[in-house]
Image (cartoon, rainbow, N blue to C red):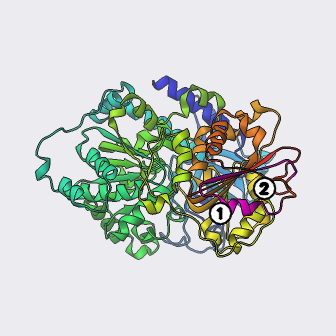
Amino acid sequence: FLKHWDRLIDLEAKASQVGKKGFLRPRSLNGESTSNSLFSIILDGRNEVSVDASGKSDRYIYHFVRQKLHHEANDGVDSPGPGVNNLDCALRSGDCVVLSTESGHILIAQGVISDISCHHVSLPRPLRLPGGDPSLEVKDLEQVVWRIDKDEVASSYAIMRFNLIQLFAQRPQSSLLRQLIVDLEAPRFDTGGLFSQDPAISYVRSEKSLNDDQRRSIQKILTAKDYALILGMPGTGKTFTMVHAVKALLIRGASILITSYTNSAIDNLLIKLKSQGIDFVRIGRHGAVHQDVRSHCFSELFHDTAMEAQSVDYIKQRMKHIQIVGVTCLGINHPLLAKKKFDICIMDEAGQTTLPVSLGPLMLASKFVLVGDHYQLPPLVQSTEAQESGMGISLFWRLSEAHPQAISALQCQYRMSAGIMELSNALIYGNRLRCGSSEIADAKLKYSSNEPVALWLKEVTVELLKRGITGDEIGIITPYNSQANIIRQLIDTSVEVHTIDKYQGRDKDCVIVSFVRSSKNVKACTSSLLGDWHRINVVLTRAKKKLIMVGSSKTLSGIPLLRLLLEKVNEQDGIVPVTNKDVHFLQELGKCSQMNISLSNESNSSLGRSGNRQKVVAAEG
């Protein structure tokens, strides 16, 4: 197991290096360093040579200081005290970093910080920095202004390997996790007992805002001895459910670690907890944390150095007594969590997180809850070989396949009208999804007029706006960034245009999908993004009330899942033939009660395709 996953990490790390250029963060608005970057630093001339046991020079150690401090030192100004013009950042000794020139961002070297203080940062390198004659090197390079950025890519793979090593450490928590994750032993759940006297269970049973699925899921969490899996199908209110799960766990006095691969998923849950008056600590880089939860971060406490000692004492006490902490999976090794243990870890978007990344947070908790939907986007893997060897299989998927009894599914959805829901329901979810109310099932866009409209995607959007649908109620999805950029140039800026991946977890009243690809090479299309059923599922489950899809009928029919999609729509008499000359085709769309498909034999400038039959699929309740 260890060797297998270590090999996959190696493959993925190598693949990630290929397109690494351009990753550097921009300078902050005030020109100062951001937390994981240092700007306007220069060599201070005190470069050293490290000597190995044989007496030969082993590596050079370069010391960098803030440019302003260097000039003040040359002018005879005393070295400032701690906190004055210091290197204010979150970089630490041992961090993987990239050294580059500030002007032009020319990447010079990669390395690991050997020493860092408020006044300097030191980088050892096996070879000298480029500069020609060694005697002239320092003098020449002192004229260059540098920047240092944390190498997030290298750091993330280092964390993955560390997590794997921790999994095989000889300690009780690691042993338990090995049994559950490596050996796939069945998770345990309390059965029967004194649940009627448990105030947390009583709270869940009495909370009228919860539906039966949500109530069962929270009870699954409360009865779990090892772990529980919550399958949050699209629009089923998994965040809402987790808020009440957290409240129930707090009734028991439990300490809770809330984590996810993305900052946005953590903050989405924390914002809802904050609205309920629930306190928490958020650990993370200031710029990456949502502004509504920044007041729960510690990062702002150290801006006033006079209160630094007091702040440290405050942080220790707060971390000792706080019950809820939010941090990303890759931020789990933060010093504030070094001695912190939790009763339970809740990991959101677990279906999108690779197994090695998932392991880190689980080390800090007695049991865990994975929340996600492995029928939607899997973990992002760049290496084809790593993907084919299992890197794209999340821990959520692994445990779901091994122990389906550990799953509690949220199946009652409050997003899509019945006609839209039926598409993904039939193709992906085996008709398990159901509408939360008749209002949801019958929801329709309300047009303010019935004027005829022009053609295709741009004209569809314009007509929706004319009919009183506001731009923030409309979303346009396309598989490709290049197509998204073209669409943005054509439509109203209030309409949100994104790729499929960026629409994960989002929804709109009306969604327009541009499938784009029109090709005679069906094999190429099947291997493209359109052949990925996870992404197609995301496409089909973003719209609440109206779904319009544009694509090539011939191409879509060549992809098995999309051929089933067309057949499903056709069952409802939703196919409406349309050509580019038929400028009144949207009148047909307005007549549909459930679904329409419009076909075209002519070119469409909005899609940039010609000579193929084009389809518009409109589904509404």
Does 241 sit left or right of 456 as displayed? left
Under tag 2, what secondary structure?
helix
For this view, does 72 lie left or right of residue 219? right
Left or right side of 56 for 159: left
User: At which x and y percent is residue 91?
Assistant: 53, 55
- Picture coordinates of residue 602 (x, y %)? 87, 50
Q: Which residues are magenta?
A: 583-603
Query: Which residue is tagged 1?
Result: 39
Q: Say whether residue 103 is visible.
A: no
Which of the image's four quarters has the N terminus?
Answer: top left
Residue 489, quarter of picture: bottom right
Front-most of 18 and 279? 279
Amino acid carrying label 2: it is: Asp
- Residue 432 image-quadrant placement: top left
Residue tagged 2: 140
Name the one closer to the observer, 15 or 425. 425
Q: Residue at x 74, y 62 (%)?
A: 586
Residue 595 is one of the magenta-drawn residues: yes
Q: Residues within 10 Å of mark 2 (few under 14, many from 20)?
A: some
Mark 2 vs 1, N-terminal side: 1
Q: Is residue 452 above or below residue 413?
A: below
Q: Is residue 132 visible?
A: yes
Marks 2 and 1 sit apart, C-alpha to C-alpha, by: 19 Å
